[in-house]
Image (spheres, rainbow, N blue to C red):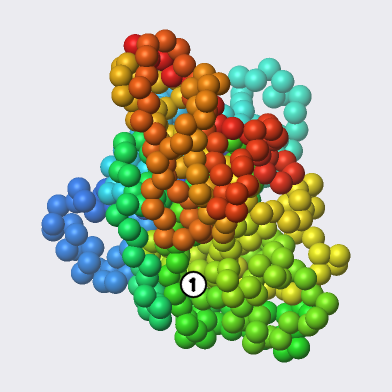
Amino acid sequence: MTAARTGSRGRGAAALSGVAATVFGVGVAELAAGLFGWASPVLAVGALGIDLAPPWAKNTAIAWFGTGDKPALVIGVALVLLGIGALAGLLEVRRPPLGSLIFAAEGVLALAAALTRAGASPFDAIPPILAVGGSLLALRMLLARRPSAEHDPLAASVDPGASRRTFLAFSLGAIAIGAVGAAVGGMRQQATRAVQAAREALRLPTATAPAPSIPTGADLGIDGLAPYVTPNADFYRIDTALVVPDVDPGDWRLEVDGLVDEPFSLDWDELTALPFAEQVTTIACVSNEVGGDLIGNAVWLGVPVRLLLERAGVQGDADMVLSQSIDGFTASTPLSALTDPERAAILAVGMNGEPLPAEHGFPVRMIVPGLYGYVSATKWLTRLHVTRFADATAYWTDRGWSAEGPVKLSSRIDVPRSGASVDAGEVVVAGVAWHPHTGISGVEVRVDGGAWQAAELADVVSEDTWRQWRWRWSADSGDHELEVRATGADGERQSAQSLPPAPDGATGLHRIRVDVR
Ligand SMILES: Nc1nc2c(c(=O)[nH]1)N[C@H]1C(S)=C(S)[C@@H](COP(=O)(O)O)O[C@H]1N2
Ligand SMILES: [Mo]
């Protein structure tokens, strides 16, 4: 074997290592971007390229590729990346760590492209970092397995054919993983974009009943106090979905089956032809600690679940509806809570005047006043299965939580923040109290374990929402403890006994410390 032949084979292996490392890193990054909804580094770099390109280049591209200019751009970026990858592989062998530095520089460029897009989020930094990390790792691994490591004293004892086959297998493996990742990631990105476009183009059904007008006295407008209606962007999110499901309303169907006379299914158009109404409902998570923020209040646009159950004809021995999500999550809701005409249990499609955000269950979810989310608020809803508590169990029930979950009476101090320092004199203490579907009739505050003092209550739309409260405190200097307790509209007093969230919701009083100067 001549030195020249070994040398060219060595260069070939180095270049292949660089190409395979590029495909691997970019593929992993595109997969992550697709699964988690982060910016695609390839598209971000392509978009930056478009922004920076001189007009003549843009016009030429459009003239050449027409409406295919986007795929052409992606292919162009991919070819440039592969070329740079080959070069990086060669340089990493000749002048280490020059190849690694090239990968790092590409990563910095992708990072800049991703983070300067309109509406970029800090998470968009993750795919470029994954791309660089994945490429560097793969490059190191492949170069170490290169067959032409003449300087390796062990090389002589190794069968060169076998080591070449191992190297090729690793290179092709890295390329295959990267290519599959990029393909799956790209398809996911397209599906997500399609659903986002469908959501933006969606026309919500008009409410047949007028929307409740929210009295101005419902919101005390105090800085730091949770607003009466929680904006969608601030609404707590709890679910088991690692990846937010993409459900296109055009493909959506709901099955209503189980212990019913006439099982049926309906699509988006049939659902939205039903009578819709807006209502204000507070929902809460059973995992909320005392004083926690896993609770929110929104204006929901929905259709009564009762109408669908009536149409199906529920049989006499049923006592539960197992609602199911497209991702397999299930919730068990007492049938009585869904059929009661006095309780506004709905299938919601709108949240605060918009279609449901994807992470809050687009296009359809259930909302039931008075029940914790894990037994009622199924997002990405696809099925209502009428059954019996004795015959079926839901996702969280199987994991030790109670089969039934009425929201417990509770209250929270939002202002001042726990641990805050305030000036002596009049201090506004404020917060929220809730017992959804029962309502709140009183809130009291006490300082350092003294006498309970009645707080002032804000207005509410109905007993289905939380209620803001305020108390004016003449604070004298020192370190003080504030506590709050609520009374339900049925006269029940909030329990002072400290219990953890499991298995059916925390109890106890919210207590904060304040330093008065
Ligand atoms: N598909 C699905 N729906 C779900 C859940 C889930 O994990 N998957 N979690 C439930 C729980 S525990 C709560 S508290 C509420 C939270 O709703 P939000 O994320 O819109 O605030 O959704 C409920 N619906
Ligand atoms: Mo929850």
Q: Nearer the viewer, residue 234 or 492?
A: 492
Residue type at the position of mark 1: Gly
Mark 1, secondary structure of its residue: strand
Q: What residue is drawn where x is 34% and y is 49%?
A: 219
- Pick the residue in front: 342 or 186: 342
Instruction: Decide if residue 225 is on the left or right side of residue 242.
Output: left
User: Where residue 412 appears, x then y in whole percent?
Assistant: 50, 37
Which quadrant of the figure has residue 9? top right
| Residue at image mark 1 | 302
Residue 230 left/right relative to 402:
left
Q: Is residue 444 visible?
A: yes
Looking at the image, residue 427 lies above or below residue 355? above
Q: How many marks?
A: 1
Position above or below: 378 against 153: below
Please indicate, yes or no, whether residue 4 appears anywhere in the rendered image: no
At a point 75% along the width and 69% down the height, the residue shown is: 320
